[in-house]
Amino acid sequence: MDVTRKSVAALALLATACSAPGQPAPTPPPITTAPSTAGSGGTPTASGSLRPTIAPPPPARTLDVARYTGRMCESLTQEQLAFLGLSSFQSQPRHYLCRWSQGHMIFDVGTYTNVNPLHEPYKQANNGLAKVFEPFQMSGFPALKRRSAAPSTTCWITVATGNEQGFEIIGAGSETVDWCDKATRAAEYLLHNLER
């Protein structure tokens, strides 16, 4: 019985010592996704840049992306694909996205019809996966540009067209292509097509 009490007391003492104030934590604390009360609205990362820790802004209006569900390869016109330099790419339709590909290069256009596509990227803003994390507005809709760190060339443009819907465009596969420029122009085209 004394051995058990001594063991419990020793464990309690050890736990108290490990959690005493001023002791260094064995791992860094997780970065919060709660709204920031600081004026910057962000948290400094290891590189010194600010990343948002707040939720994405809500869209001021709604555009229904469900009209392209099941036919995402029709979301961009042949003329738009040619202007983007994708007319020679092969299209591969899927239910919620279309992939245009050529060799190791891919260009995906996909929709979200029951979730805000900005929530997860904002939540993961500080995980270091994206070299570039730039929130912006596109035709009045909250949007986000992300680019991965080298050697990857992946760029994502994500646009929320409603509280629970939006689309994401992903380009990747060649260091000589500005995928963020292509994806941004494609997003502008898609918004235009949705408004018609």
Image (cartoon, rainbow, N blue to C red):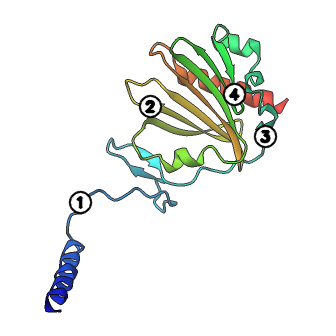
**Element under disc 2:** strand
Tell us which disc is closer to us: 3 or 4. Answer: 4
Q: Amino acid at mark 1?
A: Pro
Quick one: label 1 or label 2, which is nearer the N terminus? 1
How far across and how far down the image is residue 125, in percent? Answer: 47, 46
Q: Residue furthest top?
A: 88
Quick one: label 4 or label 1, which is nearer the N terminus? 1
Tell us which disc is closer to us: 1 or 2. Answer: 1
> How many labels, in total?
4
Q: Which residue is mark 1?
A: 26
Q: Which residue is mark 3?
A: 63
Quick one: label 3 or label 1, which is nearer the N terminus? 1
Q: Amino acid at mark 2?
A: Ser
The numbered dot on residue 94 is 4
Quick one: label 4 or label 2, which is nearer the N terminus? 4
- Contact? badges 4 and 2 (CB < 8 Å): no
Q: Amino acid at mark 4?
A: Arg
**Element under disc 4:** loop
Tell us which disc is closer to us: 3 or 1. Answer: 1
Position of 123 compared to 47: left or right? right
Q: Which residue is mark 2?
A: 148
Quick one: label 3 or label 2, which is nearer the N terminus? 3
Report, in whole angstroms, how far the alpha carbon at label 3 lies from the one at label 4.
21 Å
- Contact? badges 1 and 2 (CB < 8 Å): no
**Which residue is nearer to you in this view: 40 or 194?**
194
Q: Residue at x 19, y 89 (%)?
A: 5
Report, in whole angstroms, how far the alpha carbon at label 4 lies from the one at label 2.
24 Å
Quick one: label 3 or label 4, which is nearer the N terminus? 3
How far across and how far down the image is residue 20, in percent? Answer: 22, 75
